[in-house]
Image: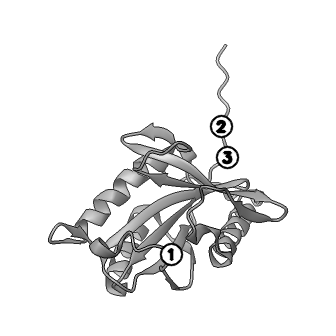
Amino acid sequence: MKILLRRSPVKLFIGFIFADERIYSAAKSVLKNKFGPIDFESQLLPFNHTNYYEKELGANLKRKFISFASLIQEERLAKIKVITKRIEMRFCFQDKRKINIDPGIVTLNKVILATTKDYKHRIYLCKGIHAEVTLFYQKRAFRPWEWTYPDYKTSEYINIFNNIREIYSHQISHSQCNPLI
């Protein structure tokens, strides 16, 4: 006898790093067409925690996060990362990306990022994609791990993910679970 347990859908979010807001707007539009309406968009934040992306993306980098109204099944995260990598390639100039697009998911208990970079605390999913639990929920707020990226440890980012979690919590408590992909 085979028993299948269906997991609750999760909240898809996208983090962007960019210098040119027009490229951000264009990429957001592509993602909106792919994944549906956006139900959260963060304020524009400076991305000054590392200079890792400057050579490729330029100086004076900015960061934004969005989340989507439609919930997804969490096993789709790797496929979504592959899609976002293709979208990044649409915005290349002279073999350099002009935007970094990182998908992740929010559950009631954690924030998970998809990444192409392996490391000791990351789990391989498929197609060259790994997952990292970046934040965990405890005492009414998300908290960082020792390996959490410095920007994700800031109060601004934690507040963003607490807000996205609140939207998600409301969705699942009102049975608005209609997975998109």
Badge 3 element: loop
Instruction: Give the color scheme: rainbow, by chain, secondary structure or one colour.
Output: one colour
Q: State the CA–CA distance, disc 2 to disc 1.
A: 39 Å
Q: Would residue 121 appear left or right of 130 to someone viewing this image?
A: right
Q: Residue at x 64, y 79 (%)?
A: 156
Q: Residue at x 67, y 71 (%)?
A: 158
Q: Position of residue 88 (x, y in %)?
A: 30, 65
Residues at badges 2 and 1 in contact (C-beta under 8 Å)?
A: no
Amino acid on which disc 1 is placed: His
Q: Residue at x 50, y 71 (%)?
A: 37
Dot label at residue 8: 3
**Residue wearing tag 2:** 6
Are there few (<14), some (14-19), or many (20+) residues within 10 Å of tag 2?
few
**Residue wearing tag 1:** 49
Q: Depth-wise, is mark 2 or mark 1 nearer the camera?
A: 1
Q: Depth-wise, is mark 1 or mark 3 nearer the camera?
A: 1
Residue at the left extreme, as displayed: 94
In terms of depth relative to the viewer, which is nearer, 143 or 109?
A: 143
Quadrant in the rendering for residue 89:
bottom left
